[in-house]
Amino acid sequence: MVNACRDGQYSPLIKRMSSGWAVMGESQFLKGYCLLLPDPVVPHLNAMDFSVRDKFLSDMGKLGDATLAATGALRINYAMFGNVEPALHAHVIPRYTTEEPTMRTAHPWMYDWSAAPQFDVQLHGPLLAAIRDRLS
């Protein structure tokens, strides 16, 4: 994904940030789901030196602020794992009062991502632009 972002060939690309790339998730299991991808790619957070790590975590918070404002979500969940894909990326997940009661407090990975809408410029482009505007 990072190479596609560098080439300007990734349609879910929101914006280049100081530490990497803000993108909308290819699966929009919750409207406004985003990721922050560091550039250069590193295997995990602890592989970054302190100044780069601080920028990455700050950018993650800024992306969360912009997503919260653009979506009207109740809150933002943040996650970093690196178990399946050994390349650091931060998940920025808006949570809504409109979620089903059983899902509202559940781990976001409980959603069926395969049944979720896939990112579509026509459908998600206005939200992407709203998040980008709030990051500017």
Image (cartoon, rainbow, N blue to C red):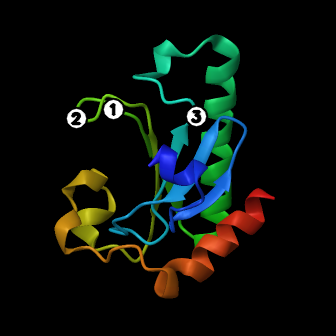
Of 97 and 108, nearer the camera is: 108
Question: CA separation, marks 2 and 3?
Answer: 19 Å
Q: Residues within 10 Å of mark 2 (few under 14, many from 20)?
A: few
Q: Residue at x 59, y 47 (%)?
A: 21
Q: Residues within 10 Å of mark 3 (few under 14, many from 20)?
A: some
Q: Secondary structure at mark 1?
A: loop
* Residue 18, picture quadrant: top right
Q: Secondary structure at mark 3?
A: loop
C-beta proximity under 8 Å, tags 2 and 3 = no
Q: Secondary structure at mark 2?
A: loop
Q: Which mark is residue 39?
A: 3
* Residue 15, picture quadrant: bottom right
Q: Which mark is residue 84?
A: 2
Is residue 106 at all visible to an observer of this figure? no
Image side of residue 60 versus residue 33, left or right: right
**Label 1 sits on residue:** 81
Image side of residue 19 versus residue 134, left or right: left
Q: Residue at x 50, y 53 (%)?
A: 4
The image shows residue 69, relative to residue 125, as above or below, that is above
Question: CA separation, marks 2 and 1?
Answer: 8 Å
